[in-house]
Amino acid sequence: MKLSKSIEELEYSQALESDKEAMEWLESNGRKFGQFIGGEFLFQKNADQIKVTNPADSSVLAAIEVADDKTVDLAVTAASKSQKSWYKAGGHARAKVLYALARLIQKHARVISVLETLDNGKPIRESRDSDIPLAIRHFYYHAGWAQLQESELAGQEPVGVVAQIIPWNFPFLMLAWKIAPAIAMGNSIVLKPAESTPLTAMFFAQLCTEAGVPKGVINIINGAGNTGATLSAHPNVNKVAFTGSTAVGRAIRKSTAGQSKKLTLELGGKSAFVVFDDADLDSVVEGIVDAIWYNQGEVCCAGSRLLIQASVEKKLVAKIKKRMETLRFGTPLDKSIDVGSLVSDKQFEQVSHLVKSGLKSGGNLFQCEKPDSSKNYYPPSIITDVDSSHPLVQEEIFGPVLVIMSFRTQPEAIQLANNTRYGLSASVWSENINRAMHVAPALIAGVVWINCHNKFDAACGFGGVKESGFGREGGKEGLYEYLKPIQLKYKTTKGASVNKASSISNVQNSTSSEIDRTLKFYIGGKQVRPDGGNSIPALNFDGSISAWVGQGNRKDIRNAVEAARKANGWASKTAHLRAQVLYFFAENLTVRKDEFIKRLMETCGVKKPEATAEFNATISRIFSYAAWADKFDGAAHDAPYRGVTLALPEPIGIIGLVAPDHQPLLAAISLIAPAIAMGNRVVYIPGEQYQNIVLELVSVMETSDIPGGVINIITGDKKELSSHLAGHGEVESIWCWGDSDLNKNIESISVENLKRTWCHENNDRDWLDINSGEGTEFLRKATHVKNIWTPYGD
Ligand code: NAI
Ligand code: MG
């Protein structure tokens, strides 16, 4: 009795990891780092410098030089020069280099972990057991994809030069997430680490040479926001991959608009941690520790909103408070601590300020200890008595601060969990498998964990929806972010430009017998007159009027989106049913073959064989996507844990389709069919030249069991209508075929709700060519993958 009591009262002493090797390495570099470009370490003359500090004691560890515009250009040029030969070297050659990198990181894992902890303030236990092993796993995993690229990713090629900008919360892990897939697929990269945590990236740069990375394939430049901005907007960069704050993500979207760059944004979050009354509450408590106190809560997918079923709220909150008392803070190199220092003075001030000002709107703060600014220590904190509109519930705090709310019923839990502008992740806690598997897909987020939180693996894609950004990292889906289809067949449009719906000048001379025919919009399953009441003529190729079509405005677009929103039941229909609807549509269209061929000839000025080919291809295309509807399914990943991760392709939501100006029938179906086959609803804006053709399809749609609101069609000025679509907060994605001005316009307006954009030059593909006009590329754009982690075992 006496002995056990004195054991309980024993004080912990420190178990410090040695920083000797890390310090020696810093010394050997003169505690100063320039840029790693073309395989060499470069220093500029009179460069600006930034101090690199240890946030736990404010000691200066080193200094970095800030890359100026010229240096950024040098890095992009080095990447550009090396890229082709790196790709040509082949998948096996690249696999060997990635494997060498994995092995070398493994060999130096200890010193990298220590450097990471010194620079970032995170507990050594986490950098040693989580960050660095996961980074190693990324290089191994992607060595495998490089090896398999030629067979498993045929038809795709690397995008070219990739700019990668990473944050400070997982400096080395984010570097691995970014670099491994990009170089595996044959791209060259320029990476910019966060200015507050550049050290492990500099260590990695030294390993690159040893691993045999050819000069220029990996370039790492230092600097802050300005360097990042110059890099991401550089004209020779083909793709930007960014992880960081939503504000900077928006700035990058804006500055790269119209540059034909690929873009992935992994931004902030306010992830829900949903606890039902049938959960194992002791596991829940440990889950909360992992969700919000791991990495001091500086985690984009931190479970920062705890939602508890009311009947267990009191009990759980008491358990959480008890557990908080046992969390240990200390110097980050101490192997037995749970919570370290925030990354910087700036972040400490930010978290303190957000909490302080948030509490002015109400709420109760509970902390076991006081914040300590001298060590940038912010204690684990919970905030109760808040509702869902409270600023602390809506804003990302990016610190160890958990807000707690309760719910009564399952639908209320789902509604509360989804009540956020973010959509990165969520977790569901319940011992009832039926409930967990029902709730997980209903949560609007890119990653959902069942009875766990903050689990990651290279095989399981990670990324968000809504304002958490777009694109995935990891998994096969992550590879496509660094690839583009090989050799699209371009369409050279044949002299059809005579026919422009808005060129009224010809109208007076026209002698069409159908002059009174007015084709209405198609909204919510009904033919609808334009809000403004204006119609414009759609001309035949010879200048005569084929029909009149409506001239849409903002209100019409709003109505169409509203109708699409109401048709959300389409997403939960079975894939089998969606396939049946598409087949039936093809059947009904076939009946009208002769009429459509005649219309195509009259409108587009093509000969009968060409019109027939377009019509036949249209029917075949509908069949293809009917076929795909129940075959483009997910995967079950074998990640290294006791469980299985389900990767489910989900529809994006409402997609705006802005169509090209040629092959009007086939182009329409090539865009609409894959989108609706995957469960999306669409608002379709035809190319301006042949707007009538798509409206002629309406009567076929009406008889084909396509629910009202799944397809909506508005005609009029393409630029005006697409701007309204791009600015609409409920449209999640836009696919656009236009000129470069139109594309730029759409990409910059889309920044409002961070829409996924997929923009092309008008003639970038011949829709008759099956490789350019149809296939999984379209299905991938029509879906995003949700990864649901389902552990098993007691
Ligand atoms: P940040 O978004 O400014 O920094 C991330 C990276 O972007 C850094 O490498 C930075 O140098 C670079 N950057 C900054 N401005 C840029 C620009 N205009 N163009 C290109 N690159 C630019 O994040 P910051 O200021 O360090 O943290 C502010 C807040 O952002 C945090 O309190 C947190 O709420 C959030 N954040 C979220 C992260 C996430 O993973 N979701 C990561 C880091 C921060
Ligand atoms: Mg630092």
Image: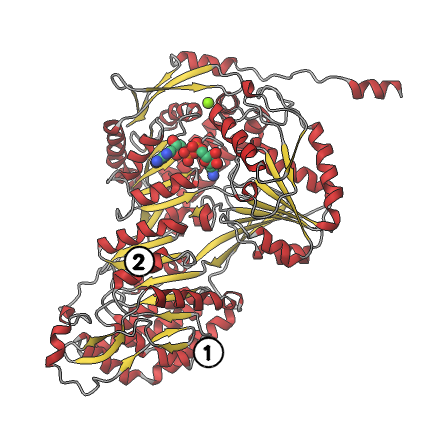
Q: Which residue is mark 1?
A: 705
Q: Position of residue 324 (x, y in %)?
A: 69, 31
Q: Is residue 497 above or below residue 102?
A: below
Amino acid type at image mark 2: Ser
The residue under the point 27% across, 81% down is 518
Say left or right for 398 vs 324.
Answer: left
Please tell me in which quadrant of the rendered image residue 235 appears. top left
Mark 2 closeness class: few <14, some 14–19, many ≥20 residues within 10 Å: many
Q: Residue furthest right?
A: 1
Residue 723 got which mark?
Answer: 2
Q: Secondary structure at mark 1?
A: loop
Q: Position of residue 391 (x, y in %)?
A: 54, 42
Q: Residue furthest left?
A: 509
Say left or right for 189 vs 441.
Answer: left
Check contact, mark 1 vs mark 2: CB within 8 A.
no
- The Cα atoms of the two marked residues, 1 and 2, are separated by 31 Å
Question: Is the CB of the residue bearing disc 2 within 8 angstroms of ligand 1?
Answer: no
Mark 1 closeness class: few <14, some 14–19, many ≥20 residues within 10 Å: some
